[in-house]
Amino acid sequence: MALRKHKKKVRRPKAAKRGGASRRRQPSRKVARKNGVKPGLSPYQQGHIAGFEQGRRDGYARGVENAKTAVAEQPPEAVLSETPATPAPAIGQLDVLVITAGHIASLDIGIVQPFRELQKRGDFSFAVHTEEEVSRELIEAAHTIIFLRNVEPSSFALLELAHALGKTTVYVIDDNFLEIPANTPVGDYYQVPERKETFRQFLTHAHIIKVDSPELGSYIEAKFKRKVVYFPASVDFAWLDGVERTSRTSGQVVIGYEGGSKEEDFVVVVPALRRILDYYGGFITLEFYGYVPAELADHPNVKHVEGNQEYRSFIRKLKQSGWDIGIAPLAVHPFNNCKTNNKLREYGACGIPGLYTDSPVYRPWIKQGETGYLVPHTEDGWYKGLREMIEDPAMRERIRVQAEAQARGEFSVEHCAAQWNQHVFRH
């Protein structure tokens, strides 16, 4: 995607005017819209909405001010702890400082792997630190400041400091927190009003927005009128080359899934898998790495391995699994549609023929029956797709070979590093 030129000067958000409703007189339609409420509501409803909006803005503002105070009071000689991702070069030698919300897989496959490749080529240095570890001195030492998945108000204060010091800022995001469903621990965390407001501020003020999904890029461009940079994360084939896939002589077909708890995504898949187990009997085995649906956990043909492995160990184990079919269900709604094609990259790199929900996450990458297989996200869609894959071993082998070739060509560390150079660093 093309980038527009970005100015270093950042305008701070204007202080919001207090909204609300009077018992005697409702605000005009113009004033109501300005305060974020809808005309035609009762005074109580308008006051409730305006109060919520004011609370959101006040909470965000307090978080930013507290963070500014903390950064200002930090002594210049503060010593920062090294992160597991990469040792910090000496102050004064940083091309890039990465400020991450946490040490997660997104950090490794999206940033650390390609940055180590650039470092290996020479004339490139970087360091990774969490929000809590960063000082003014470290920001001063870097040319470019990259923020990864940050939503705390204190982290936006660091972006404002970076702008005040004349640094280029990049916001890397691989989930749409404005559309994340609530009523889960993760959803409830990101639905907190001041975190949602911080997310909006990053999308509004960072010089460059980098995403892993074209659908998320289109969403941001439409809603925030910002140009974004899009390219997917990487797979380190140095971790996988030399790892042997399990060869099977039993004639069984093994269907696997890897990932965290995804109850919503499996609502229509569980009954389809039950039908497959009933129809094929002992000819089928299901293996789950990480999450396993409770309805299937006690079935004699279901195996479960706990997750929480270090990423390198995990992906090597995934290749060793030798699954005949890897499934990637994804309920279709605005939050999921903006996700990255992570499972497609991993299944392809590990030589696992993939069966995927027909969604914007996977559709651009799959040639049906050649690099993967797309199914409607319904019980019958999954049941029929599983049967097609089970009963056509020639198609599975074709997908296995071509998906791995696609992964090596489009998702390698070297390719990802070149994308960072071309679209972000411009050298």
Image: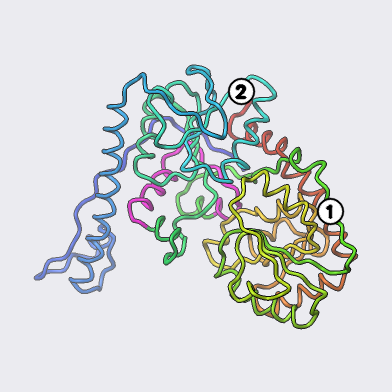
Q: Which residues are magenta?
A: 192-218
Is residue 214 inside the magenta stretch? yes
- In the depicted view, which residue is nearer to us: 1 or 82? 82
Displayed quadrant of residue 152:
top left
Residue located at (44% from left, 45% from top): 203
* Helix, strand or loop status at disc 1: helix
- In the depicted view, which residue is nearer to us: 29 or 376? 376
Judged by its main secondary structure, the magenta piece is helix
Place of residue 26 in the rendered image (x, y in percent of width and height, measured from the top left): 16, 68
Estimate how packed mark 1 is, as few (under 14), some (14 to 19) or many (20 or more) residues with alpha carbons within 10 Å: some
Answer with mark 2 or mark 1, whichever residue precedes in sequence.
2
In the displayed structure, 319 sits above or below 98; it is below
Place of residue 276 in the rendered image (x, y in percent of width and height, measured from the top left): 75, 78
Read off the residue under disc 1: 402
- How far apart, in angstroms, are the residues tagged by discs 2 and 1? 34 Å
Is residue 188 inside the magenta stretch? no
The circle drawn on residue 38 is none
Place of residue 399 in the rendered image (x, y in percent of width and height, measured from the top left): 83, 59
Which residue type carries mark 1? Gln
- In the depicted view, which residue is nearer to us: 203 or 271? 271
Look at the image and tell me in which quarter the C terminus lies: top right
Place of residue 44 in the rendered image (x, y in percent of width and height, measured from the top left): 18, 71
Judged left or right of residue 31, residue 145 is right
Which residue type carries mark 2? Phe
Read off the residue under disc 2: 124
In the displayed structure, 69 sits above or below 148; it is above
Residue located at (34% from left, 43% from top): 153
* Helix, strand or loop status at disc 2: loop
